[in-house]
Amino acid sequence: MSTTQVETWAGADLSQIGPIYPMVGMEFILFVVCVLFWLAFHVMQAGIEKKEMEADEAAARSPERLKRVFDEEAHE
C-alpha cells in the first residue's frame, strides 16, 4: 500500500516531497494536550486514592475494630 507518490526512498529529496505523515505542524498542540490529560489523570487519581485512604482510616478508627485489635493483642 502506498500513501505517497514515492516509489523508493533511495536518493529522495524530502524537501521536494513535502509532508510524509498526516497532521504536520500539530506536534506541539498534541504534546500540550497529552500533558494536560496526563496531569488531569494524576490529579484525579490522587483524589480517588485520598478518598479511599480516608475511608480505610475511618474504618480502622471504629471503636469495634479498635476493641477487637486490642483484645487480640492482649491474648498474644
Image (cartoon, rainbow, N blue to C red):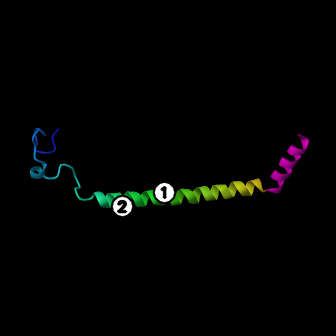
Residue 27 image point, x, y percent: 28, 57
The magenta region covers 62-76
Question: Quadrant where the C terminus lies?
Answer: top right
In screen coordinates, is 12 left or right of 40?
A: left
Residue at 46% x, 59% y: name it.
39
Residue 69 image point, x, y percent: 83, 48
- Callout 2: helix, strand or loop? helix
Tell me, for residue 3, which label it has, or none: none
Q: Look at the picture and state if 50 lies above or below 76.
A: below
Residue 9 image point, x, y percent: 13, 40
Tell me, for residue 41, which label it has, or none: 1
Magenta stretch, main secondary structure, is: helix
Residue type indicated by callout 2: Val
Residue at 72% x, 56% y: name it.
57
Tell me, for residue 32, which label it has, or none: 2
Residue at 13% x, 52% y: name it.
18
Question: Quadrant where the N terminus lies?
Answer: top left
Of 25 and 65, which appears nearest the observer?
A: 25
First reached walking from the N terminus: tag 1 or tag 2: 2
Of 10 and 46, which appears nearest the observer?
A: 10
Residue type indicated by callout 1: Phe
Residue 22 image point, x, y percent: 22, 52
Q: Nearer the viewer, mark 1 or mark 2?
A: 2
In screen coordinates, is 21 left or right of 8?
A: right
Q: Quadrant of residue 49?
A: bottom right
- Callout 1: helix, strand or loop? helix
Query: Please, which residue is most extreme toward the right here?
Result: 75
Residue 46: in magenta span: no
